[in-house]
Each structure stands twice: as structure tokens, then as C-alpha cells.
């Protein structure tokens, strides 16, 4: 039988991909246990240092310990740095009297996992990507429960929970909010609408390809919401009387952009893939061409089930927008079929399923 939850420590950071599911779980645990003490652990330099306090949760830091992937001088310094970070994590877990640690990966998670193991505090790991990171591969070896977002993620004993999402997205009814959303963006509710986004940093490839096709999209009657990334705004060329092409650096309420859209063109970060499938949005995914290939893997299962298309970064050009995107976004039948497949594959209750594992880890 599970003991009452009194104190939980959540660890993760560096990028929004780690912090967003951490906050979604925190919100679900707070809904279930209003008196629960939730402490978030991160580093001073990660996005968590801003995002966690903004959401109203206590935030404590430990020293950042990058794990070198090749022999360098940093590898020689690693034991001392890691030991110092583990000591800081031990102090936090003792002070908070933590009953369970939940880690989401990133540099901060490894020391917290090791500190929890030393103290006998149960660990729950959540891996966001199809290809697990080093920190979560370490933590999963002694975790009481391991949750993954995508099927086939190679972590032993893993349970698929999907991605914990904010309730504003998980509960979104796109059809019910379409008119409201398009009106908020100044778009005629009857126009086919395309959302282009490269995430908070933007994607230069997407920006250039779609900026070059702005006039043709406008002339074809396709309204565009283009989230170009901070500091990358541009003035699109449209035609008189054509559909609007709206450029924003980012969206404060991304759920409104989702409600407005008929089709999305985006990178295939784990959060993006999970959000779009959860709300049943057809999408063309353009994986980041650098890194370990995780973005292609993130979208592979969804694409295989008909819920999206996968296109190589090198193929995304202005002629491609003209020849592929415009015909697709103006084909209601094709969009409806892909939307249904995306919704079928999507998981809206990742936060609840992960919270169940956390409760079960406390005996």
C-alpha cells in the first residue's frame, strides 16, 4: 500500500524538453496532493532557473556536471566535480526529507540519482526521447520505475506513459476553439491555416523556405502563423487581398496556435511530437539534421501510423513549400485522415500516468 505523499524532489533541466514535463508532473501531483512539498532541483544556467520559479515551485540548484563523451581534460576533473554535485544533492534530499526522486534527464539528474541511491530514496525516471540520454541510462539501472514517452525506447523495464503535458494542451478541443483562435490571430475562420514553428529558438531552414514562399501561400488563400524564434523576425511578402502571413517570434499560448491550425510544419522534438499528436494535428516533421538522430526516431512511430509525414531538412526549400505544402494544406480529406491517425496515436494523460508511478514508488 502506498504511503501518503509528503515530499517529492523533481530533477531535470537544461532545455525546455526536460523542464516542461517536470512542471506538468508537478502540477498533477499538486492537484492530487495539495499539501505535498514539491522541490525542483536544477542548475543556475539552465532554463529551469527561470521557468520553475515562474510556475511557483521552490527551486534549488546544484553544480552543473557535464559528462564528457570523449577523452579530454574535463574527464580527469569529472570525479571531483561529480562528488561535489552529489554532496549538494544529498544535502537537498536530507533537508527536504524526500520520499521519492523523479528525474527527467539532463546534467542535473545524474548527481540526484546517485544521491538518492546512497540514501535509499526510490527513484522514478522519465525519458522524453526515443533514444535515451546518458543521465537516464544511469538512473534507470537502479530506478524503482522507468517511464518512457515513445514505444521501443531501449530502457529495461520501461513503462510507456507518453509525455506529461500541460492541461491547457492535453485538454484542448481544437474544433471548439477554432473560431476564437483564428479571430485572435486576425485570420478569417474559413481559410486553411498553416502553423510553421522551429521551437523557441526557431529553425533557419524553415524560416528561409517559408519566407521565400510567402507570396505564393498568400495568393493560394493559405493563412500562415509562423513562429520564427527569438530575434529572427522578418517581414513576409504577401499579395493584395491574399491570405495573411503572420510572423511572431514565439507564442505565449501555443494552444491557441494549435487550435487555429489545420497543418503544422515543425521540428520533431519530443514535446512537439507529443503535443501535436495529443491534440490531433496533422504535421510535417523536419528532424534536426545534427545530433544523434533522436528527432527522426521521435516521429517514426507516429509517421508509421499515418499521423504525420517525415521530411529531411535538406528537402525543405521554397519550391518544396510550393509543390508539397500548399496542395496538402488545401486538401481537407487528406488532412482529416492524418488528424484522425494522429489523435489515435496521441497520449493526453502522460502526467497522470507518470503520477501513478510516482505514488506507487512510495511504499
Image (spheres, rainbow, N blue to C red):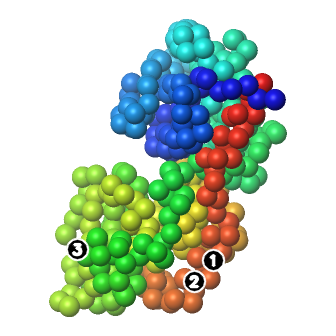
Place of residue 99 in the rendered image (x, y in percent of width and height, measured from the top left): 66, 21
Q: How many labels were placed on the picture?
A: 3
Q: Is mark 3 on a helix, strand or loop?
A: loop
Place of residue 31 in the rendered image (x, y in percent of width and height, measured from the top left): 55, 41
- Nearest-to-viewer mark from 2 and 3: 2
- Mark found first going from the N terminus, 3 or 1: 3
Residues tagged 2 and 1 counted as in contact (Cβ below 8 A) = yes
Q: Mark 1 points at which residue?
A: 340
- Nearest-to-viewer mark from 3 and 1: 1
Q: Name the residue under label 3.
A: 236
Q: Identify which residue, 357 or 113, lies in the foreground.
A: 357
Q: Residue at x 50, y 64 (%)?
A: 172
Q: Mark 2 points at which residue?
A: 336
Locate residue 304: give its quadrant. Answer: bottom right
| Quarter of the picture holding the C terminus | top right
Q: Which residue is drawn at 59% across and 10% down?
A: 94
Q: Is mark 2 on a helix, strand or loop?
A: helix
Place of residue 157 in the rendered image (x, y in percent of width and height, measured from the top left): 82, 39
Position above or below: 77 against 348: above
Amino acid at each position: 500500500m502506498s504511503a501518503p505523499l509528503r515530499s517529492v524532489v523533481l530533477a531535470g533541466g537544461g532545455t525546455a524538453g526536460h523542464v516542461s514535463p517536470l512542471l506538468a508532473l508537478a502540477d498533477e501531483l499538486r492537484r492530487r496532493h495539495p499539501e505535498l512539498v514539491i522541490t525542483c532541483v536544477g542548475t543556475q544556467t539552465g532554463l529551469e532557473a527561470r521557468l520553475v520559479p515562474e510556475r511557483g515551485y521552490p527551486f534549488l540548484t546544484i553544480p552543473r556536471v557535464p559528462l564528457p563523451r570523449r577523452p579530454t581534460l574535463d574527464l580527469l576533473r569529472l570525479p571531483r566535480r561529480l562528488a561535489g554535485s552529489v554532496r549538494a544533492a544529498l544535502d537537498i534530499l536530507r533537508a527536504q526529507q524526500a520520499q521519492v526522486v523523479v528525474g527527467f534527464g539532463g546534467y542535473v539528474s545524474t548527481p540526484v540519482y546517485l544521491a538518492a541511491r546512497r540514501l535509499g530514496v526510490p527513484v522514478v525516471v522519465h525519458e522524453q526521447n526515443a533514444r535515451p540520454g546518458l543521465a537516464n541510462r544511469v538512473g534507470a539501472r537502479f530506478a524503482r520505475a522507468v517511464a518512457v514517452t515513445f514505444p521501443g525506447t531501449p530502457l529495461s523495464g520501461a513503462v510507456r506513459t507518453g509525455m506529461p503535458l500541460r492541461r491547457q494542451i492535453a485538454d484542448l478541443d481544437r474544433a471548439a476553439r477554432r473560431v476564437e483562435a483564428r479571430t485572435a490571430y486576425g485570420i478569417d475562420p474559413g481559410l486553411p491555416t498553416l502553423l510553421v514553428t522551429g521551437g523557441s529558438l526557431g529553425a533557419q531552414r524553415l524560416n528561409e523556405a517559408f519566407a521565400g514562399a510567402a507570396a505564393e501561400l498568400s495568393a493560394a488563400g493559405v493563412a500562415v502563423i509562423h513562429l520564427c524564434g527569438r530575434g529572427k523576425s522578418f517581414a513576409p511578402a504577401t499579395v493584395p487581398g491574399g491570405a495573411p502571413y503572420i510572423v511572431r517570434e514565439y507564442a505565449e499560448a501555443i494552444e491557441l496556435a494549435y487550435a487555429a491550425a489545420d497543418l503544422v510544419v515543425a521540428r520533431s522534438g519530443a514535446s512537439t511530437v507529443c503535443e501535436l499528436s495529443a491534440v490531433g494535428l496533422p504535421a510535417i516533421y523536419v528532424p534536426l539534421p545534427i545530433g544523434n538522430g533522436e528527432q527522426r526516431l521521435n516521429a517514426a512511430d507516429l509517421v508509421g501510423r499515418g499521423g504525420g509525414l517525415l521530411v529531411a531538412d535538406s528537402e525543405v526549400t521554397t519550391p518544396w513549400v510550393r509543390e508539397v505544402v500548399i496542395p496538402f494544406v488545401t486538401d481537407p480529406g487528406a488532412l482529416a485522415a492524418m488528424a484522425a491517425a494522429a489523435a489515435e496515436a496521441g497520449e493526453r494523460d502522460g502526467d497522470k500516468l507518470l503520477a501513478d508511478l510516482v505514488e506507487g514508488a512510495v511504499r
